[in-house]
Image: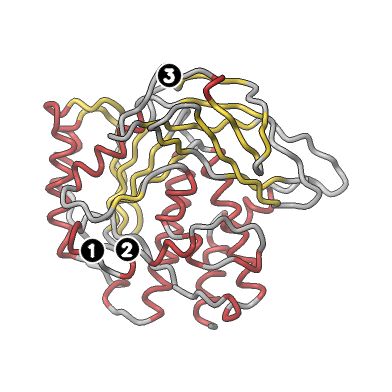
Amino acid sequence: MGVRLALFCAILGASSWGVQAAAQQPAAGLPSQPAPMTIHVTVTDKAGNSISGLRASDFTLLDDNHATPIRAFSASQAAAPLIILLVDQVNEPFRALSIEQKELQDFLGQNQGRLQFPVALMFLTDSGLQQTKPTTDGNALVGLLSKHTADLRIIGASHDIYSNEALFQTSLRAFESIVDYEAGYPGRKLLIWISQGWPTLDMPDTTMLSVKEQKDIFGMIVTASNLLRFTNTTVYSVDPEGNYDVASLHSVEWQQYQKPVSRFDRSQYGNLAVQVLAERSGGLVRYGGNNTAQEISRCTQDAAGGYDLTFEPHASDKPNAWHSLRVKLDKSGTTVRTLDGYYAQP
């Protein structure tokens, strides 16, 4: 357990996660009034198409299963959302990268390369993040993609436990950096993480974790939730390996970590899996499909439409008290996705 704890503390020490979590706590002895909170709600039909023309009266917002007044309501028609396509070359096997590149070219080149929304490409390699500027010129992005060469993966060369921990650390740092980058852009952001996902360091028995480890993990879970909410970011996980990957362990093991973490002693590394972050942010987890371009297109459909609901969150008598959120819609045959909750503060 010493190597795992050392690596995890390295994340907290070398990044701003721990600092941000502390900064979000109110000063001791000073009461705080929760600011109004706005959440984005995606409503689709059975085919995954956005449904427009809905009114505030069609929605019911539940905060910890209690109906909460919707103070403001609007259809999302602000600045065009920013779409980030993250090509994960750290966690993805070599066999998938060439196929993945071809599928990305197909997606970017559709409609003669005229993209509906600005798109930025990012590449996660062992040497760090590489990125392009957002543009609606898909042909320009295809050119940049063609010039990009996958770095040799030193970290992923072995399959021991240290390797998995290093992959976890590298991936989570990259996730934080991307969300920080997105904070500089107004409006909604869609982060589409293209890979099989990073290791969950699977450990269903929480007794194997020390109290310090669980508190550290819980702090990162809270901060991840806050960052996604503050930056208005929705996460999408797209596994490009199709049928090859559909029966693999890592494509399903994250599902045991889907429940929200309301107490530090229930925290596990798997609660920070990219698939879990996607579902909790109101995004999608796509795996088992053999056409990555189509899977990405399905995710980007969410960029058009949707609704913004503003309400007054509850204060708490203790820090980081979990509040679940659920949005019900008075329309049959629809699917509603949104942020699954927030951590209330005193």
Amino acid type for the residue under numbered disc 3: Gln
Q: Is residue 76 above or below residue 286?
A: above
| Circle 2/circle 1 CB separation < 8 Å | yes
- The circle drawn on residue 34 is none
Earlier along the polypeptide chain: callout 3 or callout 2?
A: 3
| Circle 1/circle 3 CB separation < 8 Å | no
- Residue 297 falls in image quadrant: top left
Q: CA distance from mark 2 to mark 1?
A: 7 Å
Q: Position of residue 218 (x, y in %)?
A: 61, 61
Q: Position of residue 121 (x, y in %)?
A: 28, 42
Could you tell me which secondary element the residue under label 3 belongs to? loop
Earlier along the polypeptide chain: callout 1 or callout 3?
A: 3
Q: Give the farthest residue toward the front.
A: 332
Q: Is residue 142 above or below residue 60?
A: below
Could you tell me which secondary element the residue under label 2 belongs to? helix
Residue at numbered disc 1: 245
Earlier along the polypeptide chain: callout 2 or callout 1?
A: 1
Crowding at mark 2 (Cα within 10 Å: few <14, some 14-19, many 20+): some
Please give the name of the residue rendered at 31% of the width and 48% of the height, measured from the top-left corner. 86
